[in-house]
Amino acid sequence: MDLRTTYMGLELKNPVVASASPLSEKLDNFRRMEDAGAAAVVMFSLFEEQIKHENAAIEHLITSGSESYAESLSFFPEFEDYETGPDEYLNLLRRAAEAVDIPVIGSLNGITNEGWVDTARLMQDAGASGIELNAYYIPANLYLDGREVEQRYLDVLKAVKAAVSVPVALKLSPFFSATGNMARQFDEAGADALVLFNRFYQPDLDLEEMEVITDLKLSTPAEIRLPLLWIGVLHGRINASLAASTGVHSPLELIKYLLAGADAVMTTSGMLRNGIGFLGTLVEGLKDWMEARQYDSVAQLRGIMSQVNCLNPGAFERANYIKILENYKAQYE
């Protein structure tokens, strides 16, 4: 049985990828993820704020004595708030790339060009097989229009692509007004892969303490539907690889994403809930499903239920929205 796939130009032994998570902060976990069945590992993200803070700290040391500059450091989060700085990150990346035989993909999280280009080069030099740009941006400025937000994504992608020779993936927001059109633009701008989607960690309110809560909620299987929709729509229509990155908690979600057209399927919450061995559960579950239905390779099943191949392409569009509502209403009549 051939589980091989190609993602962002990288040949992978199977489509299961360990996405960015705290688990990749320890070198031993890279080996454990490889042994469990991961075909690649995306490192935890290096944040733009960390790069800015380190650059500001270095500049402060160089220009110590400047009364006006010292206060500017207070605009950045305390460097101690981050467990790993750029140097430590690159050192871990280098050691991980040497320790495993699967691709290790660096991850940059931010939304401006500041620090990204140089850091992307350093990641490449440290042994990264590819770079994932996690463009996490919430346009809370009421005077910032949609086109300007879109251009920020394109500018970051183009700048990094021009700076490195390794493949570059872009992890997308699900909130573009025209997701398909933006995917096409990112494809034309040179993205080697699109990861669908970034999960924005949204705040809650504590009614007792009257405070904003900023805790993290892991994904659920129900969240696969939005990325499943867009992977199904985009498959066969753009050149960039497609990766799914939400709600994978069993082999069922993995299989659904592949049928819709994903080249790779990523998981974080599933590992955090079930341990690193969960990666093996996904791989074995995929094998069992394929064997039961006599599929010889992942290539045979990929995209057979995408919009371009589906017997009912309208299922991905508005017509099916009306049908779903009518069917649901019929249950109560």
Image (tube, rainbow, N blue to C red):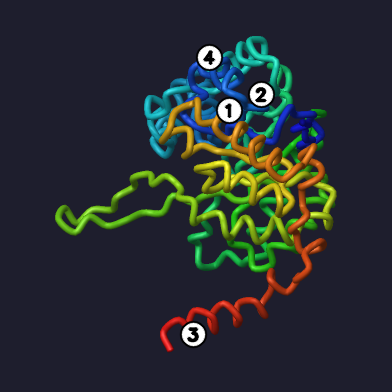
- Dot 1 alpha-carbon crowd within 10 angstroms: few under 14, some 14 to 19, many 20 or more: many
Location of mark 1 (residue): 43
Res. 104 mark: 2
- Tell me the element at label 1: loop
Location of mark 3 (residue): 330
- Tell me the element at label 4: helix
Location of mark 4 (residue): 27
- Whether residue 224 is visible to the viewer of this picture, yes or no, is yes
At 64% from the left and 37% from the top, the residue drawn is: 288
Query: Which sits earlier in the primary sequence, circle 2 or circle 3?
Result: 2
- Dot 2 alpha-carbon crowd within 10 angstroms: few under 14, some 14 to 19, many 20 or more: many
At 39% from the left and 47% from the top, the residue drawn is: 217
Return the x and y of residue 180 as percentages of the image width and height: 73, 63
Separation of marks 4 and 3 at Cα, in angstroms: 54 Å
Query: Which sits earlier in the primary sequence, circle 3 or circle 1?
Result: 1
- Dot 3 alpha-carbon crowd within 10 angstroms: few under 14, some 14 to 19, many 20 or more: few
